Image: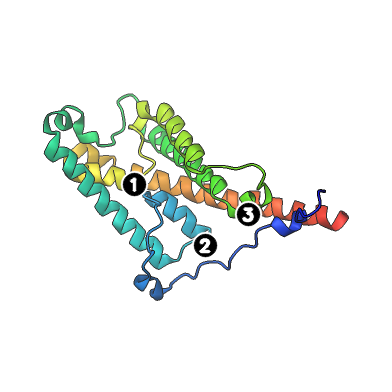
Amino acid sequence: MESGEPPFGARDYQDPPPAPLVDPEELGKWSFYRGHINPAVTFGLFLARKVSLVRAVMYMVAQCLGAICGCGLVKAFQKARYTRYGGGANELSDGYSKGVGLGAEIIGTFVLVYTVFSATDPKRNARDSHVPVLAPLPIGFAVFMVHLATIPVTGTGINPARSLGAAVMYNKDKAWDDQWMFWVGPFIGAAIAAFYYQYILRAGAVKAFGSSRSNA
């Protein structure tokens, strides 16, 4: 070890205490929003105790309102293309069962939320500080790969706010009939990813790290 370099354990990150279930004081904080832009991501972080219930609910409301406004702008300024492409509304493609569509949304969202947890984990960044990771790159690549796999099946939801915004503005029966799939699937996928990463994978890594230090 070179002189002046901190020992391995000194770079290790100590987790903050879990976020409270309800924290009304957050309503008055200035830096309220942190860029989740996806209710499934917010739900996963809530289950992992990274955000409180108050923050999670407010995030989801803002995400859905933003999605509706965004789709409204597209409809207003690109009317011809908007109509031609069905308003961008998520629908189950012909030839696929609802089970297949639901499974595609679960798996796709699991990949996204797992990548978010992995790429933004401050403990991993502290432990592997010699390997810089720019979080948007792996997250963006995960979104890209999921789109390649699931566009033919569901048009790729993996973001309930995006699916709701398109359904509200397009307002056709098919989009509403399949809407449940784009909420249930992403929330299940996010829950599985949060549980696996936070309570199995990360817990196992902490246990192994502690064992290696005790044997050193």
- Where is 146 relative to 128, above or below? above
Give the left or right position of residue 18, taking residue 55 as reference: right
Mark 3 neighbour density, 10 Å: few (under 14) some (14–19) many (20 or more): some
| SS of the residue under disc 3 | helix
Say which quarter of the image contains residue 73.
top left
Dot 2 or dot 3, earlier in sequence: 2
Kind of residue at disc 2: Arg
Kind of residue at disc 3: Lys
| SS of the residue under disc 1 | helix
Q: Badge 2 is on which residue?
A: 49
Give the left or right position of residue 65, taking residue 38 as reference: left
Q: How far, Cα to Cα, is label 2 from label 3? A: 15 Å
- Residue 176 visible to the viewer: no
> What residue is at 29 percent from the left and 36 percent from the top?
90
Mark nearest the camera among 2 and 3 is: 3
Q: Quarter of the image containing the C terminus? A: bottom right
- Residue 202 visible to the viewer: yes
**Which residue extends farthest bottom?**
25
Q: Badge 3 is on which residue?
A: 123
| SS of the residue under disc 2 | loop
Say which quarter of the image contains residue 13.
bottom right
Dot 1 or dot 2, earlier in sequence: 2
Q: Badge 1 is on which residue?
A: 160
